[in-house]
Image (cartoon, coloured by chain):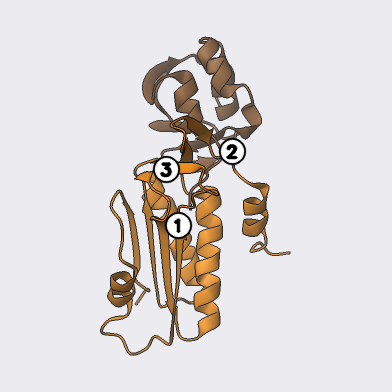
Chain colours: A brown, B orange
């Protein structure tokens, strides 16, 4: 079991209903893809936010990563939609 | 000496002239300064405001990384990037990029490069507020922006 700080932005934040939370993750959660699968088991709001999994972007410790990235040692994991700044 | 890079993420507006002056004052080696500013459009009168959300910390770090890459790639002499967040009304500034180089092409290209990457990898999200008081929802990312970014990749 590992503990991680999660932060959410834009419509991911709105659909989940909070901007951040700290979660204990089961041992089987190794990568970002595993994390997304695990979150979807936590309730309808997570399912709605993460439904289109391939569009969800992730960052570990404030750096972009892809879904295959291992999350071991992550202090902060962010999940958000494609960016629309500029 | 590495070229100075200034990055700010702020709620308040910026002044284009003072940012250009800051970057070029006291230097006689700069031959070209290019500026780009992005403004909030009213979308033919339908948009009342944009609300910009950002990821504090990562937003600054990502823009800085992009600017440093541009400095390296185009041998820029200086680069400034400022991005606003919060509620922005039509006609107001959203983003400013200033680049300096010996000759014009590098300054133009550097600013273009910074904007293309900023749009696709700096963690900002725009939400629309419409003139009729309703929320128009989150702006969708455009494929055209990915295409613009990808043209800088080696073929």
Q: Position of residue A34 (x, y in %)?
A: 58, 22
Residue ID at (54%, 10%): A44
Asked which secondary structure carries label 3, the reply is strand
From mark 3 to mark 2, how far is it between C-alphas?
33 Å
Chain for mark 3?
A: B
Classify A33 as above or below B153. Answer: above
Asked which secondary structure carries label 1, the reply is strand
CB under 8 Å between discs 2 and 1 = no
Tag on residue A24?
A: none
Chain for mark 1?
A: B
Residue ID at (48%, 38%): B128
Residue picked out by circle 3: B49
Residue picked out by circle 2: A66
Q: Position of residue B70 (x, y in %)?
A: 50, 67
| Residue that lies at the very extreme toward the left in this rendered image | B26
- The residue closer to the viewer here, A40 or A61, is A40
Chain for mark 2?
A: A
Residue picked out by circle 1: B39
Classify A52 as above or below A39. Answer: below
* Mark 3 vs mark 2: in front: 3
Q: Position of residue A64 (x, y in %)?
A: 51, 43
CB under 8 Å between discs 3 and 2 = no
Image quadrant holding the C terminus of chain B, namely bottom right
* Mark 2 vs mark 1: in front: 1
Q: Counting other residues with Cα less than 10 Å from the Cα at mark 3, is it few (<14), some (14-19), or many (20 or more)?
A: many
Give the mark, 3 or 1, whose residue is nearer the N terminus: 1
Residue ID at (54%, 56%): B117
Asked which secondary structure carries label 2, the reply is loop
| Residue B33: quadrant of the picture | bottom left
């Amino acid at each position: 079991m590992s503990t991680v700080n999660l932060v959410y932005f834009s419509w991911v934040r709105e659909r989940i209903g909070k901007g951040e939370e700290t979660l204990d993750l089961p041992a089987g959660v190794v990568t970002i893809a595993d994390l997304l699968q695990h979150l979807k088991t936590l309730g309808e709001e997570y399912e709605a936010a993460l439904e289109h999994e391939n569009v969800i972007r992730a960052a570990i410790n404030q750096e972009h990563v892809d879904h295959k990235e291992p999350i071991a040692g992550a202090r902060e994991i962010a999940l958000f939609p494609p960016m629309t700044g500029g | 000496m590495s070229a100075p890079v200034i990055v700010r993420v702020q709620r308040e507006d910026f002044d284009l002239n003072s940012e250009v002056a800051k970057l070029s004052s006291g230097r006689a080696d700069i031959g070209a300064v290019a500026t780009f500013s992005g403004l909030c459009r009213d979308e033919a009168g339908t948009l009342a405001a944009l609300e910009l959300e950002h990821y504090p910390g990562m937003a600054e770090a990502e823009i800085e990384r992009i600017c440093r890459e541009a400095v390296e790639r185009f041998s820029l002499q200086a680069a400034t990037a400022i991005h606003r967040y919060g509620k922005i009304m039509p006609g107001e500034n959203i983003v400013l990029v200033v680049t300096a180089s010996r000759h014009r092409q590098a300054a133009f290209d550097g600013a273009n490069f910074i904007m293309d990457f900023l749009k696709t990898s700096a963690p900002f999200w725009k939400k629309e507020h419409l003139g009729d008081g309703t929320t128009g929802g989150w702006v969708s990312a455009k494929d055209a922006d990915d295409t613009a970014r990808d043209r800088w990749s080696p073929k």
